Amino acid sequence: MYGSLLAASVVATAGALGKYPRLQLVILLLVTGLVFWAAHVYAHLVGERTLGQPWTRAEVRRVAAHEWSIVEAAALPALAVAVSPLLGLGLNTTAWLALGVAVAQQVLWASLGAAAAGADRSQVAVEGAVNLVLGLIIVAAKAALGH
């Protein structure tokens, strides 16, 4: 669920990227999502493994599918970066757009997840607020660092 915060962190900390900054940021977002997905899959499998028992393909597929949302969370901010030239956005504004998209999707998914789990409206609001605060901490860090 926190893949969007990971994507927000990537955007917030990406400084000058080089000759093709938008392409490099898209690649950085997607590669980071994939690496963290793989690490989560591995950690989950190791944590569930019975000593001496190999993993089955079905088990690996199940865990990989369960953790895929980490990669999905990087996709929308990457898309925002990719289409930013079509919107006439400069690089700085592009980074802020991608950061905003990442934080907004984090709040949305946290709220939807709470609602799907049967939380009442006040708990859904708390889930959304907590995730908004976490996202705003990343926004504040980006603003403070001048990236």
Image (tube, rainbow, N blue to C red):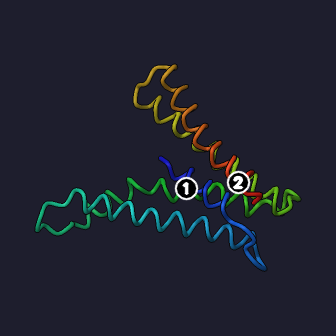
Where residue 133 sits, quadrant-wise, is top right
Secondary structure beneath disc 2?
helix
Q: Amino acid at mark 1?
A: Leu
User: Which disc is residue 106 wearing?
Assistant: none
Q: Amino acid at mark 2?
A: Lys
Question: Where is residue 46 drawn, in percent x and y?
Answer: 25, 63
Q: Earlier in the sequence, mark 2 or mark 1?
A: 1
Residue hosting label 2: 142
Separation of marks 2 and 1 at Cα, in angstroms? 14 Å
Q: Which residue is farthest bottom?
A: 19
Single out the mark in the foreground, 2 or 1: 2
User: Which disc is residue 6 wearing?
Assistant: 1
Task: Report if the CB atoms under discs 2 and 1 are less than 8 Å apart.
Answer: no
Question: Where is residue 136 drawn, in percent x and y?
Answer: 65, 42
Query: Does residue 38 appear to the left or right of 32 in the view shown?
Result: left
Secondary structure beneath disc 1?
helix
Between 142 and 47, the one lying in front of the other is: 142
Query: Does residue 38 appear to the left or right of 60 in the view shown?
Result: right
Badge 1 density bin: few <14, some 14–19, many ≥20, Cα 10 Å: many
Query: Does residue 67 appear to the left or right of 51 in the view shown?
Result: right
Badge 2 density bin: few <14, some 14–19, many ≥20, Cα 10 Å: many
Q: Is residue 118 above or below residue 57?
A: above
Q: Is residue 119 above or below residue 36?
A: above
Q: How many marks?
A: 2
At x 12%, y 64%, the residue is 51
Q: Is residue 147 above or below residue 103?
A: below
Q: Is residue 126 above or below residue 80?
A: above
Q: Which residue is farthest right?
A: 88
At x 38%, y 53%, the residue is 66
Q: State the quadrant of the C terminus.
A: bottom right
Question: Where is residue 77 drawn, in percent x and y?
Answer: 66, 56
